[in-house]
Image: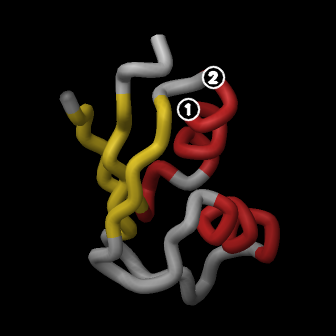
Amino acid sequence: MPDKKLKVTLTRSMIGLSPKQEATVRALGLRRIRQSVSHDDSPSVRGMIARVSFVLSVTREA
């Protein structure tokens, strides 16, 4: 399954997030609004996305 990728985009500001939530967004590699990163589709990445899903947009890449 490592051939499947997720494109994660920061859609809202990190202002107002708890320190743990902000750390999760930064651990995903996101720093600025509308910045996108690509990650392998794994349970650990899915868990991180679930914690801060309200500030992210996620799409599947080929």
Q: For the point 56% across and 88% down, which residue is it?
A: 15
Q: Is residue 22 left or right of residue 54?
A: right
Q: Is residue 52 left or right of residue 60?
A: right
Secondary structure beneath dot 2 equals helix
What label does residue 46 carry, if any? 1
Q: Percent position (x, y) of residue 29?
A: 56, 66
Q: Position of residue 1 (x, y in %)?
A: 46, 11
Query: Which quadrant: the C terminus?
Result: top left
As displayed, is residue 2 above or below residue 28? above
- Percent position (x, y) of residue 60? 25, 33
Q: Which residue corresponds to mark 2?
A: 43
Here the colouring is secondary structure
Question: CB atoms at circles 1 and 2 under 8 Å apart?
Answer: yes
Question: What residue is rendered at 39% in x and 20% in y?
Answer: 3
Quick one: which residue is furthest to the left in this view? Answer: 62
As drawn, which residue projects farthest toward the front? 3
Q: Residue furthest top?
A: 1
User: Can you tell which mark lies on residue 31?
Assistant: none
